[in-house]
Image (cartoon, helix red, strand yellow):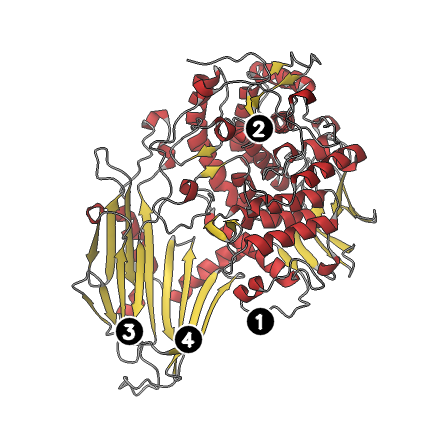
Amino acid sequence: TPFLFSLSLTIDVSPLLGSGQYYGGNRVLANLTISIDGLAPYTAYRRTLDLTTGVHTTSFTVNATAAYEVTQLCSYPDQVCVYHFATTSSSPSSSSSSSNNATTLPTIRLGYENQLVANDTYDVFCAADHLRLAGVTQLGPPEGMRFASVARIADETTTTTTTTRCTCAGELEVTPADGQTALTVIISAETNYDQKKGNPESGYSFRGEDPGPVVERLASAAAARPFPDVLAAHVADYQSLQGAFRLDLPDPLASAEKETAALIAGYAYDGADAGDPFLEALLFDYSRHLLVSSSRANSLPANLQGRWTEQLWPAWSADYHANINLQMNYWAADQTGLAATQGALWDYMEDTWVPRGTETARLLYNATAGWVVHNEMNVFGHTAMKEGASWANYPAAAAWMMQHVWDNFDYTRDLDWFARQGYPLIRGVAAFWLSQLQDDAVANDGTLVVNPCNSPETGPTTYGCTHYHQMIHQVFEAVLHGAALVAQGGGGDDDDDDAFLAAVTDSLARLDKGVHLTSWGGLKEWKLPDAHGFDGKSTHRHLSHLAGWYPGFSVSSFLGGYANATVQDAVRETLASRGPGNAGDANAGWAKVWRAACWARLNDTDRAYEQLRYAIDVNFAGNGFSMYWAMSPPFQIDANFGLGGAVLSMLVVDLPLPYAARDDVRTVVLGPAIPARWGGGSVKGLRGRGGGVIDFSWDDEGIVDNAVVVSRSKAGGSKVRLVNIRGKEFGEL
């Protein structure tokens, strides 16, 4: 039964709360162990991840004579991972009788296991040229998700006199032929999860084809090809994305040849040598690498851990939190040429959010149109609330995600995609909110407000949450922009659309825009009278009422805030009151990089760079992963991605115009907050709204002094002028 709430200062939404029981979560499939005989003692050990190729390499020397190298990669084109073991030594080992002056590879053993689950839930099968794992997450009834993996010795390896045997422990033992210098293992893994089956027609089963034949086919196909061919296909695919953007920063500390762990351990947050531009650029590149590696078409989008967990029950189920975390994962995608990585995100929303979200909108909110999701989502269509109102009562998640849908179109100008997938998503969210807005009967100011609402993870359940109004403002603007574009393409001109657009136009005009000042000069988080005491200063980790400033644009652009001193002062006061992101409620990296980005949009170079350094110093571990609570587990990937967005916010301000001003000339500011520490740096391949591409560089003070338009904006966008922070013009984009 739907519950209808009258407008009041505090509201009980307990009738709407649900349960996290049977919610599930991402989990480790298994461990594949590859052990190498007789390689101790070893020296000259070196382990590298090449961020230009996406290839991981380990090299070492044994007995000071035999040199070995292990090359590992996961190939999107071939849908397999590859383990290539080779000797790079020209001297024969003492155990080799070969006369061809080449070191013979030692025996290796392959083994699958998962000590976190019951042995009766999976089986390991050993054959002459491969090892196969097959299992199920739950024996049932009902049966859980099926999974399978194959580790196959490549054909080019087995055409020699390589010998194999299955050991008593169920391992595959591979003994290379005399004089053999290379050996390749192809690994494939799959489940029977199919998000296209997450709809009423499929009974929300999410069950696809058996994964066994799939992994056999993928592994066999890749194993039949020479390793150099598989490697080349991977590198070409990876570089088409990773190579689309380049950030060059100076290396004043000669950091290039130092180990990453040592760089991070020695990183200085403050003092004369505060910051390390080389490391900051490295972490930026790593941010993009992680996105390329964890979000591709025909897969799932990046979750709280990207796609990396070694646990059966990872923190927060390694799910999709959509009150900042999922959004932050994709902050850097559009501007750095990684728009294609978001295909997984659009499909995930369309396939798992919309079907169940439509039902949730009807059941919880009595909505007759549109769809809704809340803060925590899994891969099985969970769109309702969980148990606690302060964090679960968050129906604005989809509204915020629609910013990413609009941005993807705005940066790519892919109208075919937008008409087919993007605009229907935005339209559905707008339709939901049209049915939910209420007249503000407290202020009696003629505005429409949200009721009930919780600002993410803090404060009361009440009405008029600033964050919601900012996000809905953006959704309604995107509808008006989008409908006009789709209509130009031959759609969206029927009577139903006319009535819908009229309702959006009216509601947009009456919507409270979420900008009210506290008694101390900050932005209010709730449209509550001051007497109720909820607008005091807070060091809470979330900056929800600043989402329209950054990463959004309802405040910074639609309301003219970027150039408005009153709004700037309110944002500045709010940021200062919120602290650096280390309060008792959390000490998370994502809170710090969000603050860095907000300071950058204020053109405050010193505070932005200080906050970025603080995040790296406090939250980034020796392997580059961001940790949730200072350096303590769990690993949470959002700050890795958010660092990329924060750096971009220091490099450029590129804001959309409101629909009413769509024909005005836009101004893009290059280098709003580049620190002098980055002096002499440059950017290649920055994407702009409208589809243009820019290269630019800056002087020793961080002031952009040169900009080249590589490609102009595509037809249909507004004119764009390029300027630096001091107003110097560089022409039009």
Q: Position of residue 534 (x, y in %)?
A: 63, 26
Marked residue nearer the N-terminal end (2 or 1): 1
Query: Which label is found at residue 37?
Result: 3
Relative depth, front residue between 701 and 195:
701
Marked residue nearer the N-terminal end (3 or 1): 3
Q: Which residue does the numbered mark 4 point to in the structure image?
A: 60
Mark 2 near mark 1, Cβ–Cβ under 8 Å? Answer: no
Q: Which residue does the numbered mark 2 point to in the structure image?
A: 459
Q: Residues within 10 Å of mark 1 (few under 14, many from 20)?
A: few
Q: CA distance from mark 3 to mark 2?
A: 59 Å
Mark 3 near mark 4, Cβ–Cβ under 8 Å? Answer: no
Q: CA distance from mark 2 to mark 1?
A: 48 Å
Relative depth, front residue between 225 and 557:
557
Q: Amino acid at mark 2?
A: Gly
Marked residue nearer the N-terminal end (1 or 4): 4
Q: CA distance from mark 3 to mark 4?
A: 14 Å
Q: Residues within 10 Å of mark 4 (few under 14, many from 20)?
A: some
Using residue 470 as the reference point, say whether residue 641 is left or right of it: left
Q: Which residue does the numbered mark 1 point to in the structure image?
A: 257
Of circles 2 and 4, the one toward us is 2
Q: CA distance from mark 1 to mark 4?
A: 18 Å
SS type, badge 4:
strand
SS type, badge 2:
loop
Mark 3 near mark 2, Cβ–Cβ under 8 Å? Answer: no
Q: Position of residue 384 (x, y in %)?
A: 43, 26
Q: Amino acid at mark 3?
A: Asp
Marked residue nearer the N-terminal end (3 or 4): 3
Residue 485 showing in the rendered view: no
